[in-house]
Image (cartoon, helix red, strand yellow):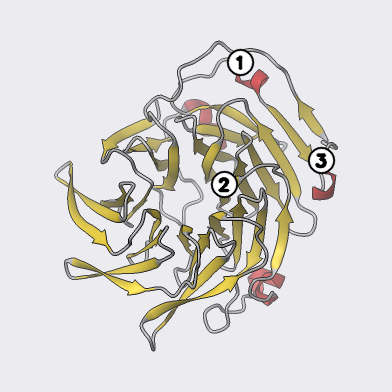
Amino acid sequence: MAAVEVHQFAQCITCHAWSADRSMIAFCPNNNEVHIYRLSQDKWEKVHVLQKHDQIVCGIDWSARSNRIVTASHDRNSYVWNQEGSEWVPTLVILRLNRAALCVQWSPKENKFAVGSGAKTVCICYYEQDNNWWVSKLIRKRHDSSVTSVAWHPNNILLATTSTDGKCRVFSTFIKGVDTRDSKAGSVSDSKFGEQIVQLDLSFSWAFGVKWSPSGNTLAYVGHNSMIYFVDDVGPSPLAQNVAFRDLPLRDVLFVSEKMVIGVGFDCNPMVFAADERGIWSFIRFLGERKSTLSGSRYSSQFSEAFGKFYGQSKYGASNDGIEPSRSRGGIHENCISCIMSLTESGSSRKTRFSTSGLDGKVVVWDLENQEDLSGYL
């Protein structure tokens, strides 16, 4: 089994994040607080409690370079926490939201962060030294419902979002004075702030977690209809694939390499998806199991050469209603897995170690290094 560590930190965990050296973890125990634990002599001990929010903290991200923590909450606020001595001091963030903040993530260069909200907007926040606060520019009038997840492209400019309107969108977040024109980014660095690069209408249900591959060439996101979507060549004519499965829906995803994705959600057991030599994505197995039986007969995939031809015009398709004997749900996790985080350095293209947290209050560390059947995809 790929799980190497299991920690019961609370009765329920909504989200978590790690420090750069992985010696500390910050998580929300399903309330308005953020607890920080440090590993000391093989034991985890609580060292800080961040108390500033009034409602449930639903997003945490810990920057690797600057050692800052950003939090987002249903109270419509966000704070950036800086460690000064032995204390964590909050810095005000001007979000201008009239609905709950739902997700947050630092950009790769850590000079910005994005906050998705229930107000159908995305806040791109950057620091103003003169006033010692973080201000935001809003991407408005694009989403038709709550923004459930955000993901930064490696170029620090493009931002992917998912929403309960069933769509995944990619925007430019270029801000003068914060970002610089980059010839390597091509036309992306010439686009204006808030400009929509592409809108993906692949899902007919709520869309949740979204991630870019390490190279930024592939985008993956999940829907509440038990489907996961993969998009290559994001732009005017993207290549789209989908993988449907009969198990419970996913909530979040993580690229561990260019050819492998881990999905987590209501099934309480991480699912492994991988691309073959042709670039066709498929379900491989549950990570909590050594081998899955008849897995290939229970999943179908579709592939289209152009986004406009996606519906009903798949180039490759497979479907077989083989029945697999019933199996017990989950494994190590006993409730929905709501968050997955990489434990590998950000510059690495292979993220073999990652952690998951869920509504059962557990944080589980997984390692794919010794999984022989998966080594070909790493």
What residue sits right under mark 1 in the picture? 294
Percent of width and height locating residue 373: 52, 26
Q: Are marks 3 and 1 in contact (CB under 8 Å)?
A: no
Q: Residue at x 42, y 30 (%)?
A: 370
Residue 220 in sight: yes
Q: CA distance from mark 2 to mark 1?
A: 28 Å
Give, as a three-letter code, the residue at label 1.
Leu
Q: Residue at x 74, y 45 (%)?
A: 240
274 above or below 72? above
What residue sits right under mark 2 in the picture? 208
Dot 3 surroundings within 10 Å: few (below 14), some, or many (20 or more)? few
Residue 234 in sight: no
Residue 77 left/right relative to 378: left
Q: Mark 2, mark 1: which one is toward the viewer?
A: 2
Give, as a three-letter code, the residue at label 2.
Phe
The label on residue 27 is none
Q: Residue at x 74, y 59 (%)?
A: 235
